[in-house]
Image (tube, rainbow, N blue to C red):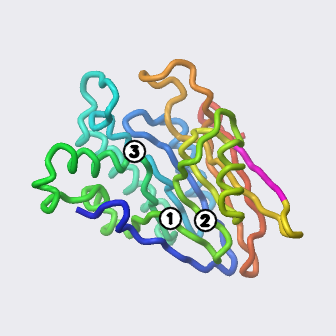
Amino acid sequence: MIVQKDLPVIKEDITTGIVLIGSDFHYPFQDPLAVKAFLDRAEGLQPSHIVLNGDLLDFYRLSRFSKGEGRNPRDEIEMVREMLQTLRGLCPESKIYYPIGNHETRLEKYVYDKAPEIACIMDNFYEILSCEDLEIQGCSKVIFNNEFVCKHGQLLGKKSGLSAIKELENSYTNGATGHTHRLAKFITRKAEKKYVWLETGCLCSLKPEYMLDPDWQQGFAEVAFKNGKLHKADVFEIEEGVIL
């Protein structure tokens, strides 16, 4: 069983191209309209790269929290596999990367906590999802042109933008993270150089059964490179299945 610490860091050079970034689908709590908007954008844009920035799976039954009925992990896996097959069919030439999120690590934690004896014969979730067959590469993070990092993220803030500020000031590089389910674009300067960090929102329901009135925003990000340099980075909001 491949564990989180063994996942590679992908370093990718782009001369000219667009990276489409989406995260936090949280199947089976995905919003079908938001997911469709993201897939439609991918089909129309035909980006050179797509980053699925963690938490596609929720692994609801494997969490430490109280669980509702149902939510079999196998059902989540089948739903995500179908979505990945659709995405690959829509964007056959795009390079697709899938950095691990904190919800995906629930499988690793559950196995090692509950049944460590069988960890050596357990497939990791990338194998279960048939990512290799779809030419989707699992990783811990992706770094483009040594200046823009995509990872799921772990530095939280109570409001939109605070996580982006923490992530940027922790590293002083450019980047994009999910995890917070909020949209934000933070720009600053240091030593005469501009930096930008994006919070890329979510593609899950804004009315999940496990939380009351969350302060979340649906959306995704697009990052453009031109002549080998970061050209622009923006977030896009989705409202009721419509990209604003």
Q: Earlier in the sequence, mark 3 or mark 1?
A: 3
As measured in the structure, the alpha-carbon distance from the residue carrying label 2 to the one carrying label 1 is 7 Å
Q: Position of residue 27 (x, y in %)?
A: 39, 39
Tag 2 and tag 1, C-beta contact below 8 Å: yes
Q: Quadrant of the C terminus?
A: top right
User: Compared to 127, does 8 lie above or below?
Assistant: below
Secondary element under disc 1, as helix, strand or loop, is: strand
Residue 29 in the figure: left or right of residue 131: right
Secondary element under disc 3, as helix, strand or loop, is: loop
Residue at point 44% right, 51% down?
A: 101
The magenta span reads 184-188
- Labelled disc at residue 141: 1
Residue highlighted by disc 3: 103
Magenta segment: does it hold 119? no
User: Compared to 94, does 106 lie above or below?
Assistant: above
Q: Position of residue 156 (x, y in %)?
A: 59, 42
Residue 67 in the figure: left or right of residue 186: left
Residue at point 56% right, 77% down?
A: 12
- Between 153 and 128, the residue placed more toward the observer is 153
Residue highlighted by disc 2: 149
Residue 107 in the figure: left or right of residue 48: left
Label 3 Cα crowd, 10 Å radius (few <14 / some 14-19 / many 20+): many
Q: Position of residue 218 (x, y in %)?
A: 60, 37
- Labelled disc at residue 19: none
